[in-house]
Amino acid sequence: MNPQYDLHAHSTASDGTLAPAELMRRAQAAGVGVMALTDHDTLAGLDEAAAEAARLGLGFVPGVEISVTWNATTIHVVGLRIDPENVQLIDGLTRLQAFRDWRAVEIGRRLDAAGYAGAFEGARALSNGRLISRTHFARFLVDNGHAADVRAVFRKFLVKGKPGFVAGQWAGLDEAVQWIRSAGGQAVIAHPARYTLTRSKLRRLLAAFAAAGGEGLEVVSGSHSRDDYFSMAHLARDFGLLASSGSDYHGPEHPWIELGRLPDLPDGCRAIWKEWPLSI
Ligand code: AMP
Ligand code: MN
Ligand code: MN
Ligand code: MN
């Protein structure tokens, strides 16, 4: 039997709630054979995850999920099998982290003006000194009774038109693909069915991505429906992209996604791991 691949997940190095080593243990216990760590805009969890995966005999893929601004929309590009020592990638991510730090203060300032005091300090405390994500703001606002759950916070506070919204100024699409390629990795568009893009705009994104040297599309994602698997498989074929599969796991507090439950890729997909060495 083929091992189960899960090529998208988060740890406490970004907005996940399990430490990198804990994530690896939970993945193996759930039956995953090859696990990636793809934290938002940081490589900080990779050493710990790699060491624990090696100890467990679990296949490990070093990765990252890069925030990109394309046509005024935030897009996520996953890099797989990247070299965590690559200077171009590290320098690019350092710039995004600086924007994140500025944005966190700005989100806090706006929430404060809207009558929700202490959000920046609260989000920073929840991030434990690591990267601050909107998810940390969401958890703070839930803990303080301002919304029922994380998804409700996003709807009420953190998306366009809401009091805590700050527009992204992330990497360019070509730039993010270039960083990944220079680090020897493969670039994959994350959860493509989740963007609020029309079908024709999504096709334009994939054309630009493939032209920039992007190689993969996340056909199976924890945030996709069954219908999405098939329509994304179709798009991957249209644009000559390899198919990837990842849960986008953020921890047991987000019970709508669990590890080890990904379905097979639809028939006709070319799996991104097909050309990988078996020693992963
Ligand atoms: P950031 O990169 O800091 O802007 O935060 C983006 C993260 O917020 C995503 O990776 C998700 O984990 C989370 N997120 C975005 N939208 C939602 C939503 N509607 N409900 C729950 N979590 C969300
Ligand atoms: Mn996230
Ligand atoms: Mn994402
Ligand atoms: Mn993700």
Image (cartoon, helix red, strand yellow):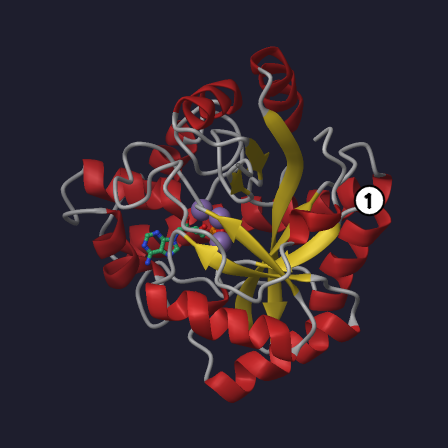
The answer to whether 113 is drawn above or below residue 58 in the figure is below
- Name the quadrant containing residue 164: bottom left
Q: Is residue 183 visible?
A: yes
Residue sitting at x 54%, y 79%: 202
Three-letter code for the amino acid on which mark 1 is drawn: Ala
The answer to whether 225 is drawn above or below residue 106 in the figure is below
Residue on which disc 1 sits:
183
Residue sitting at x 44%, y 38%: 15
For mark 1, does the 10 Å Cα neighbourhood hold few (<14), some (14 to 19), or many (20 or more) residues?
many
Q: Which quarter of the image is occupied by the C terminus? A: top right
- Residue 66 in the image: x percent, y percent? 62, 52
> Is 280 situated left or right of 197 in this image?
right
- Residue 79 in the image: x percent, y percent? 67, 49
Q: Nearer the viewer, residue 128 or 19?
A: 19
Q: Is residue 45 visible?
A: no
Q: Nearer the viewer, residue 130 or 70?
A: 70
